[in-house]
Structures are given as structure tokens and as C-alpha cells.
């Protein structure tokens, strides 16, 4: 026997066993790796399903993020971040605007106003603040404005509801109202389209705002009262002292005998001596949806009992600017037909317009004249707060009427009392606009005080 041959056989066997050992080791390692990978995949899948379940429990609203995902808004990117709030909302509040016609000039103003208004609501909802409430945006659109409104508002996340006037003009029985209402106020009988907000029955509360408004603070206290009723905490007069009350106009007590179905402010800028009732300010109404109420409004309009010298029902709800439409029919409904169910809020904290409270000019910050809100409250003729002096931190919403629209870039660089507050309101609007562009549309951050940089990166006619 060849000794070398036997050695080769042993060496070959050793090599065979060595290969076999390696194969066994590789098999064991591979099996272990597969088990570990499968384990982590299982854990990851379970976590994703849990997250998805939590998101579904929070509702179906994706708001700013998903609304903009498939749209390019004025050059904004489609890359957005998703913020998940695991807290369940107490309720979803409906927010509605009305578009009665397409703008004849500065068509981009509708887009600017709607985008910033919605984002201000988002910032004061459960998604970005201490609020307990979610939100859903609606645009009540007259048929004549469907083309422009759908094009500009739908990509922003507004649900477009095309709605005609509740009562066709030819069906109004009162001759005076039928003949005069088309030219009354800003928009004629199209202003009645706002009443469709009462038909949004999927929400416990609906807030109707004009496009040129801005939400500055959560309005949970109002929603709580409408959903839960008046409590000793919310019945108090001043929220700045107790952290939860509601500031009612004239420091009047909050009605507690029956449910509150509406909150509004009045437009004392349109008040005049001798008028019995001041109209509501048409840019702010918090309401309880009700088909019964909507049908009652339709019957009031259809009957058309608006008198030349006595207004609605001859009870003094008119004549004044817009009295034949929204500004007059709302106080007629809540003050006369259903007293105690609507509450007038302090216009310094809600719907602040930086208006002069008296009927003579203010010079060097010194007011003069009679209080406009004293025309129908004579006992308060010399007592009216100057809302222009309110700290912006105490104001819940502002309305750009006297201050002019921020997107139109009217200078607010004077040192009069109203200009100082208007400048703060405009600054807040631009701050919300910048937050929208950087946090939601993912544009680069710019210095708002650097006019050259702002103009270069944002375009337009920005002024600090």
C-alpha cells in the first residue's frame, strides 16, 4: 500500500469534514438571520398597523398636508410633512366662506386670503395648538363664481358647495324687498348664500367667516358653550381674568335659560342716531346648524316683509347698509323672533376691525364724540372701549376691513392709533403666510424684515 496514498485519503476526508462544518455553520447563521429579520418585520408591521389605526380613529381629515400633496399652489412644492396628533378631537367644527362672484381685479387675492385663513384655522386647531377641536373647510359658491372658486379653492382643501340663493328673486312676495334687494349691501341677494351654512348638519357648530379674516386664538370657549351649555366658568364676563369665560358685549351676562345657537358681533360703524337696532357684522357668525332654522329663514325671505322705514317686520331692523340681506335678517331672527338664543360678543376680542368707537375723529389718540354703540343703548352713550387699544394677545379674530387687505400691500406705517394695531394685524397675517410657505409648502425660510430677500424669494410687492 502506498503510504502517501493513505495520507491523501485522510487529508481529503479532513477537508470534506471541514467543508461540511462550514456548510452547517452557514446554515445555522442563515436560519438565525432569517428568524431575526422576520421578527423585526413582524414588529414593524404591527407598529405601522397601530399607527394607521390611531390615524383612522382621529378622523378622515388630512388637512393642509394631503390637500396640497397633488397640487402645485403658486410655485409651492408638493413635498409636505405629515404631523400625526394621537389626541382624539372633541368634535370637528365646520368653517365656511362664501364666494358670491369672481373678482374683477386682483384675482390672486382670493387665493391669498383663502390659503392664509385656512392655515390660521389649522394653527388654532387640535393639530397645532391646545384646542380640542378639529376643522373642515367649506366654500359656499354661487353658480356665477363656480369656475374661479373651484379652480382656486379646491386645491387648498376647501370642499366646494355650489349653492344658489335660498329663495329665487321672483318668488319674494314683498314688492319693496324684491325690487331693492339686488343692489343692497355689497352683494345684493347673493349675500343670502351665507345662510346655507345652516345646512352643514354633519357638524355640531359652524363658523362662517369672510375671506379677509384671520383667526388668532382658539375659540374653544364658544364651541364648548354651544355643545355643553353655559357653565359658571363660561358665564363669567372676562376671559382675560379667569382663563375660560367669554367676553360678551356691554359686559352683559351670558343667557342661561335656553341653548345658545349663535354668537355674532355688530357693525357699529354703520350705526346712526335714531336707529333701533344695529346690524350684525357680516364677516363673523358662529352658528348651530339646523335645517329647521334654514327653512325658517327661507320663509322670512319668501314673505319679504321688509319695510322702507321699518326694516324686517317693521321692527327697526333696517334700513342700514346690508339690512335687506345678511346684516339685517340675522339680528331680526335672534333679537326679535328668537330672543335669548343668540349672543353678541365683544367686538374688541372677536372680529376686531380696529374701528373708531365714537362718531367724531380721533386726534393724537384722544377720542371725541358719542359712542356709536350707545345709539341703541343710551345708558352707555359715554362708555365704550376703544378696541384699537386692545393688546393683540387678547384678540381671537380680526377682520381686514378698515385695515385693508394685507395682500394689497396698503401702507400701515403711520403713528395713528388705528394704524399701530393694523400694522400688528398685517404682521400677524404675514407671519401665518410665512409659516404656511415654510412648514407646509416646504419653501426656504426667509427674513421677513429683509425686504430685498423677501422680494427675491417670494416675489410680489411685500413690505415689512
Image (cartoon, rainbow, N blue to C red):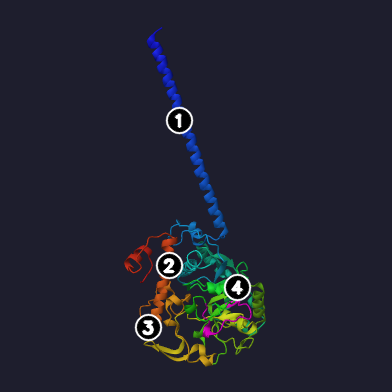
Q: Nearer the viewer, mark 1 or mark 4?
A: 1
Name the residue beneath numbered marker 1. 25
**Could you say which disc has been placed on residue 76 in the image?**
none
Q: Are circles 3 and 2 on residues that touch, CB within 8 Å? A: no
Relative image position of residue 5 (x, y in whole percent) = 40, 11
175 vs 118: above or below: below
Instruction: Tell me the mark number nearer the camera, choosing from 1 and 2.
Output: 1
Disc 1/disc 4 C-alpha distance (Å): 69 Å
Instruction: Find disc 3 in the rendering and name its residue.
Output: 416
Q: Residue at x 42, y 14 (%)?
A: 9
Calculate the distance from the C-alpha at mark 3 to the C-alpha at mark 2. 26 Å
Q: Which residues are magenta?
A: 245-262
Label 1 and label 2: CA atoms lie apart by: 62 Å
The answer to whether residue 272 is seen in the rendering is no
Asked whether 247 falls inside the magenta stretch, the response is yes
In three-dimensional space, the C-alpha distance between marks 3 and 1, rounded to whole angstroms, equals: 86 Å
Residue 154, percent from left and from top = 53, 63
Residue that numbered label 2 is attached to: 433
Dot 1: element: helix
Tell me if residue 231 can be seen: yes
Q: Which residue is mark 4?
A: 228
Number of the front mark, 4 or 2: 4
Total number of numbered labels?
Answer: 4
Amino acid at each position: 500500500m502506498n503510504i502517501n496514498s493513505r495520507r491523501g485519503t485522510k487529508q481529503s476526508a479532513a477537508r470534506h469534514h471541514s467543508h461540511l462544518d462550514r456548510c452547517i455553520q452557514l446554515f445555522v447563521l442563515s436560519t438565525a438571520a432569517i428568524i431575526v429579520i422576520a421578527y423585526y418585520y413582524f414588529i414593524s408591521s404591527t407598529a405601522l398597523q397601530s399607527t394607521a389605526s390611531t390615524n383612522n380613529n382621529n378622523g378622515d381629515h388630512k388637512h393642509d398636508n394631503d390637500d396640497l400633496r397633488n397640487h402645485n399652489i403658486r410655485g409651492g412644492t408638493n413635498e409636505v410633512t405629515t404631523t400625526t396628533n394621537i389626541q382624539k378631537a372633541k368634535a370637528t367644527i365646520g368653517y365656511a366662506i362664501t364666494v358670491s362672484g369672481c373678482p374683477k381685479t386682483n384675482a390672486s387675492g382670493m387665493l391669498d386670503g383663502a390659503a392664509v385663513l385656512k392655515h390660521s384655522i389649522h394653527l388654532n386647531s387640535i393639530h397645532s395648538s391646545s384646542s380640542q377641536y378639529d376643522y373642515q373647510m367649506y366654500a359656499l359658491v354661487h353658480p356665477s363664481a363656480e369656475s374661479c372658486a373651484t379652480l382656486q379653492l379646491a386645491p387648498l382643501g376647501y370642499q366646494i358647495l355650489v349653492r344658489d340663493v335660498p329663495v329665487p328673486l321672483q318668488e319674494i312676495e314683498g314688492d319693496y324687498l324684491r325690487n331693492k334687494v339686488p343692489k343692497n349691501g355689497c352683494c345684493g341677494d347673493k349675500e343670502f348664500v351665507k345662510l346655507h351654512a345652516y345646512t352643514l348638519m354633519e357638524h355640531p357648530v359652524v363658523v362662517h367667516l369672510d375671506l379677509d379674516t384671520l383667526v388668532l386664538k382658539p375659540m374653544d370657549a364658544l364651541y364648548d358653550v354651544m355643545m355643553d351649555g353655559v357653565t359658571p366658568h363660561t358665564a363669567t364676563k372676562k376671559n382675560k381674568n379667569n382663563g375660560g369665560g367669554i367676553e360678551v358685549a356691554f359686559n352683559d351676562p351670558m343667557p342661561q335659560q335656553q341653548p345658545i345657537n349663535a354668537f355674532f358681533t355688530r357693525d357699529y360703524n354703520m350705526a346712526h342716531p335714531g336707529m333701533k337696532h344695529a346690524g350684525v357684522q357680516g364677516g363673523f357668525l358662529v352658528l348651530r346648524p339646523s335645517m329647521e332654522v334654514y327653512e325658517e329663514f327661507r320663509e322670512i325671505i319668501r314673505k319679504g316683509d321688509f319695510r322702507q322705514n321699518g326694516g324686517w317686520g317693521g321692527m327697526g331692523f333696517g334700513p342700514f347698509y346690508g339690512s335687506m340681506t345678511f346684516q339685517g335678517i340675522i339680528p331680526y331672527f335672534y333679537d326679535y323672533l328668537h330672543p335669548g338664543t343668540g349672543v353678541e360678543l365683544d367686538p374688541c376680542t372677536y372680529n376686531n376691525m380696529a374701528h373708531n368707537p365714537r362718531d367724531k375723529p380721533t386726534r393724537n389718540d384722544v377720542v371725541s364724540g358719542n359712542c356709536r354703540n350707545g345709539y341703541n343703548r343710551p345708558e352707555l352713550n359715554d362708555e365704550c372701549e376703544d378696541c384699537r387699544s386692545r393688546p393683540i394677545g387678547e384678540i381671537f379674530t380680526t377682520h381686514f376691513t378698515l385695515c385693508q387687505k394685507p395682500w394689497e400691500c396698503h401702507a400701515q406705517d403711520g403713528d395713528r392709533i388705528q394704524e399701530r394695531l393694523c400694522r400688528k394685524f398685517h404682521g400677524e397675517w404675514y407671519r401665518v403666510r410665512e409659516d404656511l410657505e415654510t412648514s407646509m409648502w416646504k419653501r426656504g425660510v426667509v427674513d421677513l424684515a429683509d425686504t430685498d430677500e423677501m422680494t427675491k424669494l417670494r416675489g410680489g410687492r411685500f413690505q415689512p
